[in-house]
Image (spheres, helix red, strand yellow):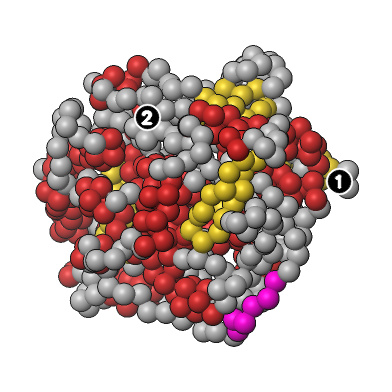
Amino acid sequence: MKINNSHHFFLLAGFGTISCLTNPTDGFSSSVSAGASSSRVRPAWTSERRRRVGTTTRTATALRDSAENDPIDNTQRLETLAKIANEALSSHGTEIFKPFHARVAVIPPSNDDDDDDYDVPRQFRRLGLIASEPVSKADQTIAAIPFYDSDGSGLALAPHLATKVVYKDVLPEGYDGWTGDIGLLAMLLLNEMARLHVDAATGDASPKGVSDLPRRKPPVQSLMNAYVAALPSHREMSELHPLLWNEEEQEILQSSSTKKIYRLLDDVDDDAAWLEETLWNADRRTFPETVSLRIRSPDGTDDDDDDDWIEERPCFSPEGFRYAVALVRSRSFFVDGSLRLLPFLDFANHGDFDSYEISGGGIGTLWGSAKGAFLKSGKALNVGEEVEISYGPKGPAEYLLDHGFVPGMCRHSRRGGSAITAELTFEVDDGDRFRDDKLDVLEYETYDLAPMDPSQSFDVVGGVGSTGAPDPAMIQFLRLVKLGGRDAFLLESIFRKEVWGFMSEPVSEENERDVVMGVIDACEKALEDMEGEDVSDGNLSQNAKLCAMVRESERQALERTLIYMKQESEALDLKEYYQERRLKSLGLDSEWSREDDDVGWGGTRVPGGADYDW
């Protein structure tokens, strides 16, 4: 899951990455107290917060301006970065990977015919993985990487390494940002970049950040250095990822989708502001706003300036944090119960067909078996053919917000798409007289391992084969949200253990009507809020076309759901409701007649029918 290598970024595909390759040294000092309070109050979310003056910092502007003078062109830069990665894999890959039957390569532009629906330019090149050995069949392991979760001595990065290892003496105990695990991984990634800082004047190593953590063996650290060297630069991500688009393009996306980018941006900026005020500003020697990184090709020479250059990146700053969050969103995988960064495996590009998601499992090592992640091929491959994986079952907006592109399976076109979704959000009203009872049900009586929040978001589905039928879980939640009036008796304590199960079926015609109308109103409101030009408009910018693709796909999902729910509203009298089901379970559902006067007392004993001899 990443930005850096996908040639499927059919609108934004790759500007070359510029990164670094140096050897970090030990050394860390910090004046930040670990006892700082982590409690924060979340500001109210409004569109105006995104339009405020000064959102883009001077540092970010300077970085974008300086990026125009990149020392080598796009293709040569990508080839250099591929060489750096492959040299590290050849020299040290066996130290960590079990196995790694692939190489990093420059992937030419795709000739996906489906792009013709939108007249999308595909002139860019990207990095990807190609098979280094023949793959005889599908489901064959191409690469595997162990986690080393206890101390982070391997390559894989997990959120707990931020709070338990790298920043354990810096972050306050119990730190929990709005960006969650993504934010913690972003902080780990910033630290890896800072460890590779060089003096801009001399090019000599001058590590920053928590420069001695995590502790790794030199071969493993060399692999990490090479991985960081192949990450996309800030300039590239500014073109590729919505989090770093300009404000005008972000505003277009905000009005194009039911998944709101402004909410995501507020989470990122709120965390960055807290970290800057509480931690980074207190020790700028350790946590610099920018770092300088040196790139040198493995086959370059000291006198070869074309294969050796220094790049400045934002680091421990709001812009740097947003940059790192964009990298993590585009590259992370959820494996073995945790979100993770899996260096080198994440070079694999997305493929809609004949591809598998990264999976977890046991990996045999010299010391036994360890947990790790596997990259498996979805089909047989010859040497030199591209290795593709699936980035998972997501909708168009999720792919754009995570990876910066919209794959064919998520696009509404004349051929149809199989993963066209939109998002609807519902919540228990603050003014609901039964709110406390409903919150109690959601917290304690729904799912043992995952209590439900009073606000829930659900996908509605369009595309090929979709009937527009909503997620049963959404209807179940809405029945509880709308429960009231004569149905409120179900919230009594006697039913508390059963009420969530009752919501899986229609409660009453009145309740069901409220549920159906709630979905209809939400669909109509979402469609009304969507603004923008048609994707076929030749005057749209590349990013605006991406937004238009999301908008058209979500409209199709919402319209199909709207049609289905309107049909449901006309068939409410045909459904079986709680009282009918209850009577049936007690055997009291048949109609009464005079023939039923004989209630069946039996052949010999009826009231008053005893014949006693007194």
Image coordinates for residue 583, horizontal then vertical, percent: 28, 57
Q: Secondary structure at mark 1?
A: strand
Q: Residue at x 44, y 36 (%)?
A: 15
Residues packed near mark 2 inside 10 Å, few (<14), some (14 to 19) or many (20 plus): many
Q: Which residue is mark 1?
A: 368
The three-letter code of the residue at mark 2 reads: Phe
Magenta span of residues: 28-33
* Distance in Å between CA atoms under marks 2 and 1: 43 Å
Q: Is residue 287 left or right of residue 140?
A: left
Locate the C terminus and report the quarter of the image it occupies.
bottom left
Q: Is residue 355 visible?
A: no
> In the shown orientation, is residue 537 left or right of residue 111?
left
Q: Could you tell me if residue 510 is visible in this image?
A: yes
Residue 317, position in %: x, y?
A: 47, 66
What amino acid type is highlighted by mark number 1?
Gly
In terms of depth relative to the viewer, which is nearer, 258 or 124?
124
